[in-house]
Image: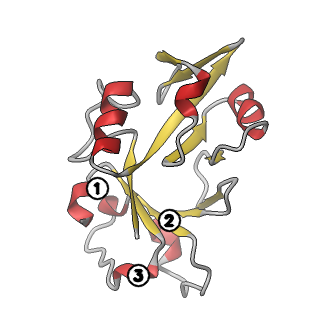
Amino acid sequence: MILISHRGNTHGPITKKENTITHINSALNYRFHVEIDVWKIGQKIYLGHDRPQHEISKSFLHNKKFFCHAKNIQALIYLAGTNLNYFWHEDDRYAITSEGFILAHPKHILKSPVSTYNKIICMSPENIENLKLEPHNSFYGICSDYIFKFL
């Protein structure tokens, strides 16, 4: 099972550090995958949750461990022209990435039988009271702000 750090968080949300290169690299150093929020404004690429905050080079995105969340249409169009793993969603129950991963809100995925499709990522399971993720192999991966809880 892969473990995905949400915006670089590993032990809980740290809003001021989320989507910063240092925070992301720290999660990568623990060998986690990382979900990052990507914006494109003009010719520049940024990271940031609610707005573009941290300018990055395009080459920074080229990491096989990234799940790139396009935050505006320009970012989505840019990412669609790459071989990166990216997705778009807002308040959806499910989203699919360019590499065929299904990102699923646990409230919805656990109410129906999990199929034999083996590329389902459980998003933010810590937000569901009394959620039991046993057996761990029901999901391909977990994405969380508290990813160390799932080691």
Q: Amino acid at mark 1?
A: Ile
Give me the residue at 67% from left, 63% from top. 100
Tell me what residue is drawn at x 30 percent, y 60 percent: 126
Q: Earlier in the sequence, mark 3 or mark 2?
A: 2
Relative side of 151 to 90, left or right: left
Q: Is residue 42 left or right of residue 13?
A: right
Q: Earlier in the sequence, mark 1 or mark 3?
A: 3
Q: Quadrant of the C terminus?
A: bottom left
Q: Image check: 98 left or right of 92?
A: right
| Label 3 Cα crowd, 10 Å radius (few <14 / some 14-19 / many 20+) | few
Q: Residues within 10 Å of mark 2 (few under 14, many from 20)?
A: many
Q: Looking at the rendering, which quadrant does residue 142 occupy? A: bottom left
Alpha carbon distance from label 3 to label 2 = 11 Å
The number of numbered badges drawn on the structure is: 3
Question: Secondary structure under badge 1?
Answer: helix
Q: Amino acid at mark 2?
A: Ile
Report the Cα–Cα distance between label 1 and label 2.
13 Å
Question: Badges 3 and 2: C-beta atoms under 8 Å apart?
Answer: no
The residue at which mark 1 appears reads as: 147
User: Height in image: 83 above or below 124?
Assistant: above
**Residue 43 placed where, x, y %?**
70, 13
Name which of mark 1 and mark 2 comes first in the sequence.
2
Mark 2 highlights which residue? 121
Residue 128 at what x, y percent from top left?
Answer: 33, 65
56 is higher (above) or lower (below) than 114:
above
Left or right for 24, reference 113 = left
What's the CA distance linking mark 1 and mark 3? 16 Å
Kindly identify which numbered label has been placed on residue 137: 3
Q: Amino acid at mark 3?
A: Asn
